[in-house]
Image (cartoon, rainbow, N blue to C red):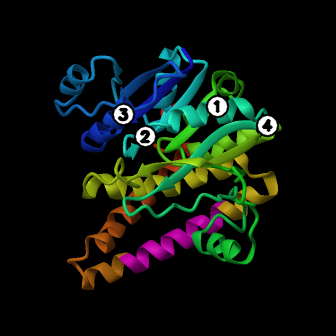
Amino acid sequence: MDVSIIIVNYRSWKPLLNCLESILCTNKTNIRFEVIIVDNFSNDGQFDFFQNKFKDFIFIKNNSNLGFANGCNLGARQAKGNYFLFLNPDTKISANTLETLFFSYKKHSEIGILSCIQVDKNNRPYYQKNIFPSLILIFGISRFLYRKTINQFDSNGELFYPDWISGALIFISKDWFKEVNGWNEDYWLYFEDVEICKKISKKGVKIAVTQNTAVLHEHGGSSRNDFETEYICKTEVIISKHIYINNNFNTFSKVPAHLSLIVFTLLEKSFLSLLSLFLFSNLKLKANRYILKNLCTYYFYAIKKQTWLSKQSLNYDK
């Protein structure tokens, strides 16, 4: 088996249907592949229908929702391919995407992780020249200003080399995946893609994006199914930033980074929560009240348990 395509799903059945149908159209002439779908305990009655509809694909039912990293690792343990393609259920690939990734990866020995151009439904490309977070660049506004003033990555050729790429589409060899011990299950959702790229970079190989193929990515299709899911996921973004800081920042940067993130986030969410009382019909503003409540609970237990991990994390009680 050349490639194992691994997809982690949680109640994203409609986009998953489009994703799997796009995979059925993949050019199979020069490549052998399998498709593994790990369902993170959607528990909504759809699993059996999909398993019967796509009989040539492998479906795995996780016994609980232990996060994206856990689902990816579970799929990888069952995979037979020499290469892994981790793919979001809210993506659609073209007929040549898998072949392009496979042969580009094999051609360029300097690559540890490969992705490709991602576009939205209006065919607009997403920003993919990502830089690793640092004490200064942990906040969105500082990253925005940095991007505006510094063009760090040359994207004129077939490939360009960002610091990290989105977990929506990650192509990696089985050997490199094992070398970095797979996905870090400290994370429940978000930043696990940044960390696996960080670990690969430390091994002396590059993170690359090929411009020879593109995928449609309906960004947020997996995490914005309803109001509750959306505010839980937005809370986890902030929690995962703390985990990343704790795992990857040096001793001198950790404390100021954690404190800055706490102060900035609580001030921002408090202001937006107050604003939502006057604009109560705005659901996006209303979500900040729930995020603020969740974060206060998280920070309380972070102090009590002496851990930055989310309660959702598999490693929380270890």
Q: Residue at x 37, y 40 (%)?
A: 89
Q: State the separation of the CA atoms marked 1 and 4.
A: 13 Å
Asked which quadrant contains residue 297, the reply is bottom left
Q: Earlier in the sequence, mark 3 or mark 4?
A: 3
Distance between the alpha carbons at the discs numbered 3 and 4? 35 Å
- Stretch in magenta: 258-272
* Quarter assignment of residue 94: top left
Give the residue type at disc 1.
Answer: Phe
Cα separation between marks 3 and 1: 34 Å
Label 3 neighbourhood size at 10 Å, few (<14), some (14-19), many (20+)?
A: some
Q: Are marks 2 and 1 in contact (CB under 8 Å)?
A: no
- Amino acid identity at mark 3: Asn
- Residue at numbered disc 1: 103
Tag on residue 110? Answer: 4
Q: Nearer the viewer, mark 2 or mark 1?
A: 1
Q: Does residue 283 belong to the magenta stretch?
A: no
Residue 247 can be seen, yes or no: no
- Asked if residue 181 lies left or right of residue 96, the reply is right
Sequence-wise, which precedes: disc 2 or disc 1? 1
Q: Depth-wise, is mark 3 or mark 2 nearer the camera?
A: 3
Mark 2: amino acid: Gln
Instruction: Look at the numbered discs 3 and 2 and tell me whether their residues touch, using CB distance below 8 Å.
Output: yes
The x and y percentages for residue 211 are 61, 51
The disc label shown at residue 65, or none: 3
How far across and how far down the image is residue 283, in percent? 26, 70
Q: Are marks 3 and 1 in contact (CB under 8 Å)?
A: no
**Label 1: element kind:** helix
Kindly report which numbered mark, 3 or 1, lies closer to the viewer in this rendering: 1
**Separation of disc 2 and disc 4 at Cα?**
36 Å
